[in-house]
Amino acid sequence: MIPQTFIETAGDILGSTEKGLSGSKIASLFAAYAVDYNTDIPYTSYPFTVSTPNKRYALKKNLSSFNPKQQFKIIKELCEHPEIKDLPEVRDLKIKLLTRFKGLNTDIDTVNEILVDETRFWLDDYTKSLEQYNYALEKYKGNIFERNLLDDLRLSLELLVKEILGNSKSLENQLTDIGTFIKRNNGSRELVNMFVKLIDYFTKYQNDYVKHDSQVIEEEVEFILEITSSFMKHFIRMKNRI
């Protein structure tokens, strides 16, 4: 069950007066959900009745008409709406939803969605890297398990490392600089070794399966995606501590 306090918070964010979804958009989206789930909702059209305080109120009342699993899916999809998905407060709301109520998630996504969302959040200031990361995610979600997916991931990681370290080296030639960067930021020797081995493994894997145009092993795509995401997120966090 999703507590009413969370429903209230979601309504305030998604229906925010200045940044949230418009009243007409709220009405049309929820009308579609009402049809999909065969559920009666109080606000199906816009403009709302005169007695309606504001669009946030309408959103909350509509959302409260659905069962918990439906509420989870609706909030998640509203957080992914193109008009608001890049707002920090919306991203934070989605992460909290996925973290606290993951048992209500009926979507079958094998990749760690929380990790992916957090990585995209941290990549917000690295637009070139984020663009390539999103390309890889689009291919993954579309079940396009081809070499270009890993190529996008490789380029995303390489662009991020170049920008953080301030050089133009290829990923294969960054191992020493990465180790130095971690030590300079008070990282442990074990952490240095882990990152160096991780990048070394990733690079060799990419060389075998991407550069040589070999057949990608579908079962390993999720693993590579999550390894890359974890590395990128932590690397940016270390950079922000400088």
Image (cartoon, helix red, strand yellow):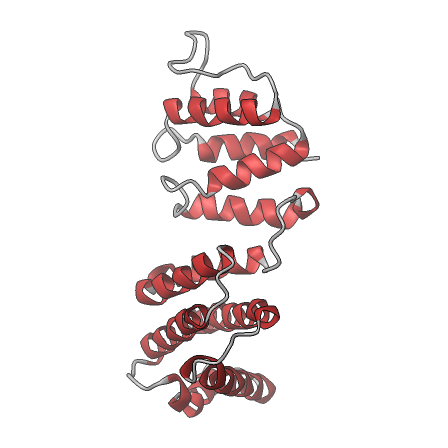
Q: Residue, x 61% and y 33% (percent of image)?
A: 71
| Front position in the image: 57 or 212 | 212
Residue 105 position, x and y percent, is 65, 44
Q: Is residue 53 above or below residue 138?
A: above
How many callouts does the rendering have? Answer: 0
Residue found 38% across the figure and 77% down from its top: 158
Q: Nearer the viewer, residue 123 or 191?
A: 123
- The relative height of residue 201 versus residue 87 in the rendered view (above or below) is below
Give the percent coordinates (x, y) of residue 138: 44, 57
Q: In x, y percent, where is residue 30?
A: 50, 25
Name the foreground residue: 145 vs 13: 145
**Which of the image's four quarters has the N terminus?**
top right
Q: In which quadrant will I find the C terminus? A: bottom left
Name the residue: 47% across, 81% down: 206
Question: What residue sits 39% from the left and 84% below the top?
Answer: 171
The answer to which of 41 and 123 lies nearer the viewer is: 41
Q: Is residue 129 left or right of residue 78?
A: left
